[in-house]
Image (tube, rainbow, N blue to C red):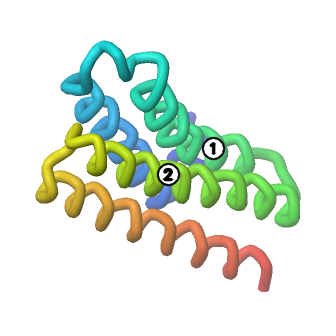
Amino acid sequence: MSFKFEELKVWQRALDFSVKIHELTLYFPKDELYVLTSQIKRAADSIVLNIAEGSTGQTNPEFNKFLSYALRSGIEVVACLHIAKKRNLIADANFTVLYSELEIIIKMIQALRKTINS
């Protein structure tokens, strides 16, 4: 048995991205554990979770609301990546890769929102 969200490319990509964020935070210093580490992991996971929660057994307007939450979480991750970069916790090259991946995910969420709203 599979759930509707498991078939969504945006959910699959967001899930892979959340793993990349988890792996990134393994190298953050301990003093960031309850600050930036927690925040960026929760925001990345929230993208995945909101896509899943909104997709199953919901109306299109309800799904759109959850996609909006996922989109906002994505923007939160962008801000966290900038903070990590400013604090020298992430190399420029790694920042660029993660930022680019997140841009794609955000565009996919926006496209899905357009599709269900039309």
Quick check: 118 above or below 32? below
Residue at 74% in and 52% down: 66
Label 2 belongs to which residue?
Answer: 11
Where residue 61 appears, as percent x and y from the top left, is 87, 65
Identify the element where label 2 is drawn: helix
Residue at 54% in and 40% down: 43
Where residue 104 appears, as percent x and y from the top left, is 39, 69
13 relative to 10 in the view: left or right: left
Where residue 30 appears, as percent x and y from the top left, is 30, 13
Label 2 vs 1, first from the N-terminus: 2
The quadrant of the picture occupied by the N terminus is top right
Residue at 40% in and 69% down: 103
Say whether residue 25 is visible: yes
Please, what is the three-letter code of the amino acid marked with disc 2?
A: Trp
Q: Which mark is residue 52?
A: 1
Q: CA distance from mark 2 to mark 1?
A: 7 Å
Please, what is the three-letter code of the amino acid marked with disc 1?
A: Ala
13 relative to 111 in the view: left or right: left
Residue at 66% in and 45% down: 50
Q: Are marks 2 and 1 in contact (CB under 8 Å)?
A: yes
Quick check: 96 above or below 83? below
Quick check: 57 above or below 118? above
91 vs 105, nearest the viewer? 91
Around disc 1, counting alpha carbons within 10 Å, would you say few (fewer than 14), some (14 to 19), or many (20 or more)?
many
